[in-house]
Amino acid sequence: MSPLDVQRLREATPGCRSGLVHFNTAGAALPSQATLDTIIEQLQREACDSPMEASEHGAILVEKARRAAGQLLNAPTASIAFAGSGSTAWSLAFQALGRWQPGDRILVGRHEWGGNLASMELAVQAGARIEVIPCDETGAVCPVALEAMIDASVKLIDLTWLPANGGLINPAQAIGEVARRHGIPYFIDAGQAVGQVPVDVQALHCDVLKSAGRKHLRGPRGTALLYVRPDFLARLNPAQRDVFSAPWSAQGFGLRNDARRFETSETSYALFAGLGNALQELNQLGIERVWDRVRQTSERIRETLRQTPGISLHDLGTSQSGLIAFNLAGWDAFELKRRLELKRINIGANDVAYTPLDMQARGLASIARISVSPLNTDQDIERLMAALRELRD
């Protein structure tokens, strides 16, 4: 991306015009003015015509969003469903796998998102076991170790691709190749991947993939997308149903034969219209260009942090994402976040609940997190580093 490209993106983003330095894209990104306008236009339509009458136009916008999501993921449009959050989307798909039996095994990476682990508790109560796939020497999930764990009792492999902490990019495609070879369902939590790195669900060999709309996609809160591989759909029997997900026919109520079996008739057309605009903007910009920009910016930040006394980095893997976990000596991560907010600089802060298996394994109680977007500039980096040095001293 050229400096002019970045300038245009920033000029189209209200948060950038307000003097804010935003390094918390992994929490929620700054939306564009066009995304805000799209949401407001649908709300105005509902206010003027009534929400029910405006729903016909809203449904058209949702289908545009579905096509844009399919384009971004290299997925058929019919394989995309929308939900109110990434955790909801993942939980719905997990629950639809069916009854768990004593002795069933669920294999997860050490960096698994805490929300997914919480959803697995019902399976554990039924007698299933959650087992951690060993990491390689770099801290990434090891496909070779996974292969050695496979037997007939393994009912699910689940991977958090880009974990919340550590900047790690797990080998999602290699894990998918193992899962596909053994015919084991494979779920990917791509909450920090979609919108940051190129995602091709065909190459990943995944059966289910989810992501939130508010993070790197720059969509509104209260939106998420769920991909379900078409040939895997028949194995999923959602417990949540209504007249949309299981419409009436002469044979009675029957589940849809596409991913919309995970949706309901009650949805926010305004929010998903906004997500659709954000997806279209990303497709027009090009995810490869976005990832190249994020990678370059995050490398500059990491190098600066390494040279700054009092900063400890917590990177894993051989190559890192735009999520940078660190601590500043003498500072609690959450208090550091609060103090930076007073200077109009946003970062994130995570405790053990975000990635409990990994945080406990590494003896980390909390971390501060910088997460990069294409909107960030050298001036943003300078303001952040100046503030960190001031607080350290």
Image: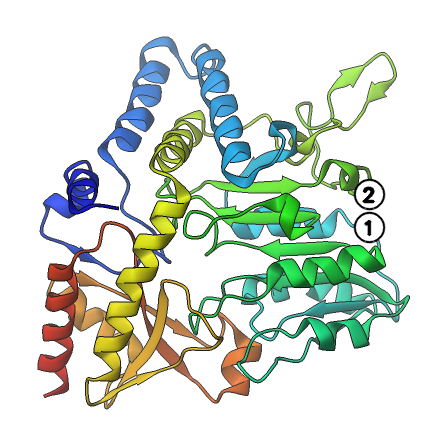
Secondary-structure class at tag 2: helix
Q: Earlier in the sequence, mark 2 or mark 1?
A: 1
Q: Amino acid at mark 2?
A: Arg
Label drawn at residue 235: 2
Among the 4 quarters of the image, the one containing residue 391 = bottom left
Secondary-structure class at tag 1: loop
Q: Mark 2 and mark 1: span between their CA atoms?
A: 8 Å
Among the 4 quarters of the image, the one containing residue 106 = bottom right
Residue closer to the observer: 258 or 48: 258
Q: Are marks 2 and 1 in contact (CB under 8 Å)?
A: yes
Vertically, is 178 above or below 75?
A: below
Write the residue at 17% across / 56% down. 377
Instruction: Kindly report which numbered mark, 2 or 1, lies closer to the viewer in this rendering.
Output: 2
Residue closer to the observer: 77 or 89: 77
Write the residue at 36% across / 78% down. 367
Among the 4 quarters of the image, the one containing residue 342 = bottom left
Where residue 175 appears, as percent x and y from the top left, is: 68, 63
Where residue 73 appears, as percent x and y from the top left, is: 54, 40
The crowding category of the residue bearing disc 1, from other C-alpha atoms within 10 Å (few below 14, some 14 to 19, many at least 20), is: some
**Is residue 8 visible from the viewing direction of this image?**
yes
Label drawn at residue 98: 1
Residue closer to the observer: 47 or 14: 14
In the image, taking residue 186 as reference, residue 388 lies left or right, namely left
Where residue 306 appears, as percent x and y from the top left, is: 26, 83
The crowding category of the residue bearing disc 2, from other C-alpha atoms within 10 Å (few below 14, some 14 to 19, many at least 20), is: few
Label drawn at residue 317: none
Vertically, is 116 above or below 44?
A: below
Work out which quarter of the rendered image holds the C terminus and state it. bottom left
Residue closer to the observer: 203 or 18: 203
